Amino acid sequence: MTQAFQSTHVDISPAILYWGTPVCLITTTNPDGSYNIAPMSSIFWLGHSCMIGLETGSQTTRNIKRSGHCTLNLASDSMKDAVNALARTTGSYPVSDGKSARGYTYVKDKFAHANLTTLPSGISSTPGIAECPVVMEAELVGEHSWFKGRPTAGACLSFELHITRIQITPDLKLEGHKNRIDTDKWKPMIMMFSELYGLRNGKVTESVLARIDEELYRPFTGTTG
C-alpha cells in the first residue's frame, strides 16, 4: 500500500503579501509646482519598463495621471531614517479616513521633512533624490485598475512606466564596463511584510542566469549602450 503523502506546509492567510521587494521613493510634481515623495515597494521591471502599484486616491497617483511622468528613486539600505520619516506621511489634504486610521499625517514639504536633497532631472520636470544611489526618470504608458469584481474594486491602480533616463552614483558601475552595475556594491533596501531589510550578506551562490551577457537583452529592451 502506498503511504499517503504528508504535507510539509500549512495554510496561512496573511493580511499583506509583501514577500520582499525594493523600496522606491517616487517623486512627482504637485499642481502648485511643489514636489511630493511617496515611499512604496509594489514594483517590478521588464526590460526598460516597470509596473508600480498605488492607491487610486493618493497624491502620487493624481500627479502621475495629470503630468504623465514621475521619477523613481531606489533607496539603499543605509537610508532607513529617510524612509521611516516618509513612511506614514501623505501629500493629500485632507487626509483620507483610511490613512488617518493608520496614523498618516499631511506633510507639504517631504524633502525637508526627510532631510533629502533634490537631484536635477534631464528629461522629466520632476527632480530625483540625490541621496538615492539609483534614480530613474519615467513616463506613463498605461494603467490598470485592481480588484475587479470585489468590494475594493478600483481602490488601487497599476501604472506601466517607460524608463527614459537612468542615473547612478559612480561607485555602482562595474569596473571596465560602461553600462553594467556592480551587483556586489548595490545594496538596495528591501521591504518584507512592512519590515526593512538589506542585502549585506552578498551573493548566496553563483547565478547560472548571470552567465548570459547582459548586452544580449538589448533587442528586447530596445535600447543602445
Image (tube, rainbow, N blue to C red):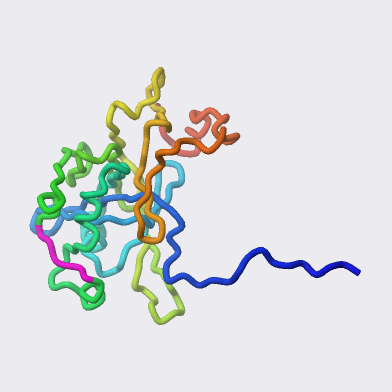
Q: Nearer the viewer, residue 20 or 38?
A: 20
Q: Position of residue 203 (x, y in %)?
A: 49, 36
When the figure is inspected, residue 157 is found, relative to residue 23, above or below; the finding is below
Give the residue at x 84% y 68%. 3
When the figure is inspected, residue 48 is found, relative to residue 56, above or below; the finding is above
Q: For residue 42: magenta?
A: no
Quadrant of the image occupied by residue 186: top left
* Residues rendered magenta in the picture: 103-108
Q: Nearer the viewer, residue 34 or 184?
A: 184
Q: Is residue 139 left or right of residue 117?
A: right
Give the residue at x 40% y 17%. 176
Q: For residue 106: magenta?
A: yes
Q: Position of residue 30 (x, y in %)?
A: 14, 57
Q: Residue furthest right?
A: 1
Quadrant of the image occupied by residue 32: bottom left
Q: Position of residue 121 (x, y in %)?
A: 19, 39
Q: Residue furthest left?
A: 32
Q: Position of residue 141 (x, y in %)?
A: 35, 53
Q: Is residue 109 left or right of residue 8?
A: left
State whether the magenta stretch is mostly helix, strand or loop: loop
When the figure is inspected, residue 42 is found, relative to residue 6, above or below; the finding is above
